[in-house]
Amino acid sequence: MGTNRRIVAINGSYRHDGVTDCLVDTLTAALEQRGATVTRIDLRDTRIEFCRNCRECMQEAGDSPGHCVIRDDMADLIETLEAADGYVLAAPTNFGSATALFKRFMERLAPYGYWPWGAKAPKFRRAKFAKKPAVLVSSSAAPASLGRLAYATLKELKTASKTIGAKPVGTLYAGMVSDSADAKPSPRSLRRAERLAHRLA
């Protein structure tokens, strides 16, 4: 891919310096070493209100995202997503799925859908020609193999990536992260994060 790639990293972790944070840190550093420009969005520090499900943003035809009636940070975030060449989408597993922080962000991706009144189902503007690469990152207290199969987190991350027009090119799922409140990713997980960076940059 070459240098000067613009990568947006969306981090849905609640905890500063937790396992998911550390994995995103490692990916970001590796991407920057390869010449990419990384914009990191920690959702815990971003003002995103809950979707009202009014569907106003889904009434606008065309390939560009619609406009939400809510005035918060999401409009600027969608502009940032639109300008990116690739993505890191990250969320730890809470109660069997992605965090509420990430789900709230996902719900506010409704402008990427087109669902005029009277239509039976929405059409997503980018789903059929998803091309931008995305790396998906998650973690859980369960073993990684169980977490991948039993929990919905990776599926939700894939749905978010498809919605914004991205195609997953790699996943990283760190398991068994519950040894202590200060648990950190294993060296193996950190090495995989570094290797995945080349798929984006």
Image (cartoon, rainbow, N blue to C red):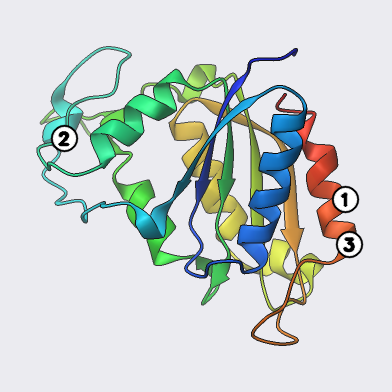
Crowd band around label 1 with a 10 angstrom C-alpha radius: few (<14), some (14–19), many (20+) = some
At a point 21% along the width and 25% down the height, the residue shown is 66
Residue 96, above or below 137: below
The quadrant in which the C terminus is found is: top right
Look at the numbered disc 2 and give the secondary structure of its residue: loop
Which residue is identified by label 1?
191
Which residue is identified by label 3?
187
Q: Nearer the viewer, residue 98 or 73?
A: 73
Q: Are marks 1 and 2 in contact (CB under 8 Å)?
A: no
What kind of residue is marked 2?
A: Cys
Residue 78, above or below 92: above
Q: Earlier in the sequence, mark 1 or mark 2?
A: 2
What kind of residue is marked 3?
A: Pro
Q: In whole angstroms, how far apart are the C-alphas of marks 1 and 3?
A: 6 Å
- In the image, which disc is placed on residue 97? none
Q: Are marks 1 and 3 in contact (CB under 8 Å)?
A: yes
Front of the two marks 3 and 2? 3
Q: Is residue 27 left or right of residue 90?
A: right
Q: In whole angstroms, how far apart are the C-alphas of marks 3 and 2?
A: 42 Å
| Residue 88 picture location, percent across and down | 60, 40
- Residue most toward the bottom? 180
Residue 117, above or below 13: above
Residue 62 figure quarter = top left
| Residue 40 picture location, percent across and down | 51, 41
Which residue is identified by label 2?
68
Q: Is residue 98 left or right of residue 200?
A: left
Q: In whole angstroms, how far apart are the C-alphas of marks 1 and 2?
A: 40 Å
| Residue 90 picture location, percent across and down | 57, 51
